[in-house]
Image (cartoon, rainbow, N blue to C red):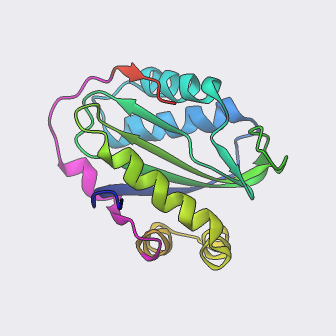
Amino acid sequence: MIPARVSFVVDFEIDANSNGRRMALWRVAARTAELLPNSSKADVASALYARERLGTTAVGGGIAFPHAVVEGFPEPLILVRRLKRPIDFGAPDGRGIDILAAVLGDTTDIKWLRSALIRLERLARDKKLLTQLRSADNSNEVRAILLESGLEVRIARDMMTMGGAMRCKMHALG
């Protein structure tokens, strides 16, 4: 069964500072709080940490898909980070993670999660797209790569104009 089409907001950053899993996830949470000023950086980070404690989100090949359901998100997000230094995420192949694609969204209807993970798994198996992602330098390039993998995405700067109050609560998913 093909999952429903869902539109995602995408954000991209080259991360030269993270030197561990918790720091990389904290930086994702901090950026989420910048994009959604009424969100709680601590709640988003806690949700990501809780999910990671259930088992690694690394799929091998240097890529991980941390994900969490966080109450109150107006739209699902995919935050892509190209890590300058590979990080140990406990990947099944033992390889350090240099691509992090965190998926966050609301608790109301989580069809976004299945949609994202299926398409991101496809991207992880596509050597051409993964090579392009590893050399991407900006959000437009990442957006084009994600579009080619079957995800409907738009760049995060549009999210700042959405407004609306939001308070996040953490939820861990398997």
Above or below, comparing residue 120 to residue 86 in the picture: below
90, 83: nearer the viewer: 90
Which residues are drawn in magenta? 148-168
The residue located at (64%, 79%) in the rendering is 128
Quadrant in the picture for the N terminus: bottom left
From the viewer's perspective, tell me whether residue 49 is left or right of residue 67: right
* Residue at far right of view: 94
* Residue at far front of view: 1
The residue located at (74%, 39%) in the rendering is 89
108, 131: nearer the viewer: 108
| Image location of residue 102, percent across then percent down | 51, 45
Q: Count the marks: how many?
A: 0
| Image location of residue 24, percent across then percent down | 64, 38
The residue located at (48%, 34%) in the rendering is 29
Residue 168's quadrant in the figure?
A: top left
Q: Is residue 155 magenta?
A: yes
Residue 143's quadrant in the figure?
A: bottom left
From the viewer's perspective, tell me whether residue 169 is left or right of residue 47: left
| Image location of residue 149, percent across then percent down | 47, 71
The residue located at (56%, 40%) in the rendering is 66
* Residue at far left of view: 164
From the viewer's perspective, tell me whether residue 28 is left or right of residue 156: right
| Image location of residue 146, percent across then percent down | 46, 68
From the viewer's perspective, tell me whether residue 23 is left or right of residue 174: right
Above or below, comparing residue 168 to residue 9 in the picture: above
